[in-house]
Image (spheres, rainbow, N blue to C red):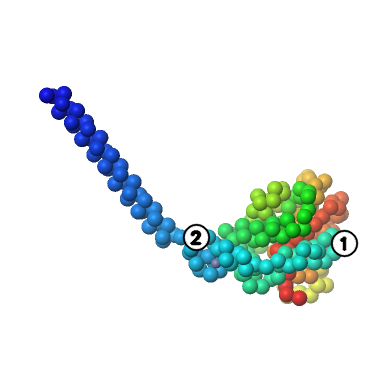
Amino acid sequence: MNVNRVSILRHGLRDLRALIRGIIGSMRKIFLSFLDLIYRKKCYFCSSSKYSLKMCPKCYDELSYSDVRPNRLIMGVNIYSCGVYEKNLQKLIRGVKYHKQKELAYYLAKFMYEYWLKIGVNKIFQVVPVPLHPNRIKKRKYNHMELVADEFCKLSGNVLNKDLVKRVKDTKPQYKLSRVRRMDNLAGAFEVDKDKDLKMPVLIIDDICTTGATFEEMISVLKLNGISEIVCMASSSPIC
Ligand SMILES: [Zn+2]
């Protein structure tokens, strides 16, 4: 009799534990879907939360590529520009650059990577984002092109080298200057770290290429240090 009672009690306890586990599991599910509902990501462009992505597929597909050919040639180096600085591409660049939307770096990198595939380069490059001066980083907290370069390398299998070139001069913002004044402003702005790999081809990436002055100054300092195989790619250029 006693044995039977113990057995019934054990069964009862097991059922009770299973019931409690079931209740906790369901409550957890309800809680998680509640969180998902509250914290679902909204598209930065159209505000839709349908995909819970920072850039939904519809807004990404609205980005359009420029022709797959060099935009210009500077000191024998091909300069590519992936798209025109307008609409969603402009908002994407401004978001990651000025509005702390770090997550958008992936989408800009993806856009650049898809263009890079169209160029059809079959080599591994060290990817050098245009560096910012430490004073500028203090203000902005991060170099957005480093984030883009990192994502670009993850997608493409190229090698990130954010320390190959340093910005040693705190230059004025370029956008209000003419081409000649831009070159003056940038003279001596960059230095190459000679301890880094100077043999591997270099892909310099930037967000906007307007006159090409930044690329030109970086190309000249790299060439002075014996690096001759260079390609430049900007995610955009202004409307011509
Ligand atoms: Zn959207």
Residue at screen point 15% across, 28% down: 5
Residue placed under numbered mark 2 in the picture: 52
Label 1 is placed on what type of residue? Met
Q: In terms of image quadrants, where is residue 105?
A: bottom right
Residue 18: image x %, image y %?
28, 39
Q: Which mark is residue 75?
A: 1
Residue at screen point 76% across, 67% down: 67
Q: Secondary structure at mark 1?
A: loop
Give above or below for 46 relative to 146: below
Q: Is residue 89 left or right of residue 231?
A: left
Mark 1 / mark 2, whichever is N-terminal: 2
Respond yes or no on whether mark 2 lies under 8 Å from ligand 1.
Answer: no
User: Between 230 and 115, which is closer to the camera in this rendering?
Assistant: 115
Give above or below for 82 relative to 164: below
Count of marks overlaid on the render: 2
Residue 37: image x %, image y %?
41, 60
Q: Quadrant of ligand 1?
A: bottom right
Residue at screen point 36% across, 53% down: 31
